[in-house]
Amino acid sequence: MALERERDEPAHLRGRRRHHGGICGRGPGPIIGALFLCECGALSAAGGVAGASLGVIVVVVVSLSRSWSTVIAPWTLAAGPAAGLVTGLVAGAYPARRAARIEPLEALRH
């Protein structure tokens, strides 16, 4: 059972289970699911922004070092964060659903 929990739940959510259990004790479970999804979406979108920024920097440095003209399509700057957001929401959907269903006392116990 513990091995399944470790595998299915991302580390940043697993470490905050006690905090979320306290919130859940004060309110309904669906709020916790939405909170988990927001966390996953924000973290993965931030990763997408960082990846897109690093990609632009690499392209600019390489093109300047080779005396090439830099051409970056504007849609590619939005594609990284968007892909990160979608990936984070899909990956966080199952743990968010589990977190919304867990009893507050069970969450506080771990």
Image (cartoon, rainbow, N blue to C red):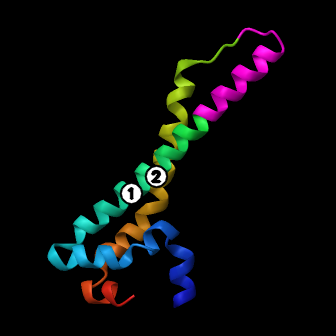
Image mark for residue 86: none
What residue sits right under mark 1 in the picture?
Answer: 39
Number of residues whose C-alpha sits closer than 10 Å to that of mark 2, classed few (under 14), some (14–19) or many (20 or more): some
Does 59 sit above or below residue 84? above
**Is 58 in the magenta?**
yes
Q: Position of residue 64 (x, y in %)?
A: 76, 14
The residue under label 1 is which amino acid type? Glu
User: Is 32 left or right of 67, judged from the image as shown?
Assistant: left
Instruction: Please check the rendered image and state whether residue 61 is part of the magenta-colored stretch, yes or no.
Output: yes
Q: Which residues are magenta?
A: 53-69
Q: List the residue tagged with mark 2.
A: 43
- Callout 2: helix, strand or loop? helix
Seen as rendered, the residue at the extreme right is: 66
Residue name at image x 28 percent, y 68 percent: 32
Q: How far apart are the alpha carbons under marks 1 and 2?
A: 6 Å
Name the one closer to the observer, 5 or 46: 46
Indicate the amino acid at tag 2: Leu
Residue pictured at 30% horizontal, 73% vertical? 20
Depth check, front residue: 18 or 44: 18
- Residue 104 in the image: state x and y as whole percent: 25, 84
Q: Please name the predominant secondary structure of the magenta segment in the image.
A: helix
Residue 44 placement (x, y as % from top left): 49, 50
Please identify the quarter of the rendering in which residue 52 is found: top right
Q: Are marks 1 and 2 in contact (CB under 8 Å)?
A: yes
Residue at 78% x, 22% y is 62
Query: Dot 1, how many residues are within 10 Å of its Cα: few (below 14), some (14-19), or many (20+)?
Result: some
Residue 107 visible? The answer is yes
For label 1, the SS is helix
Establish if 2 lies above or below 8.
Answer: below
On the rendered image, what quadrant is the C terminus found in? bottom left
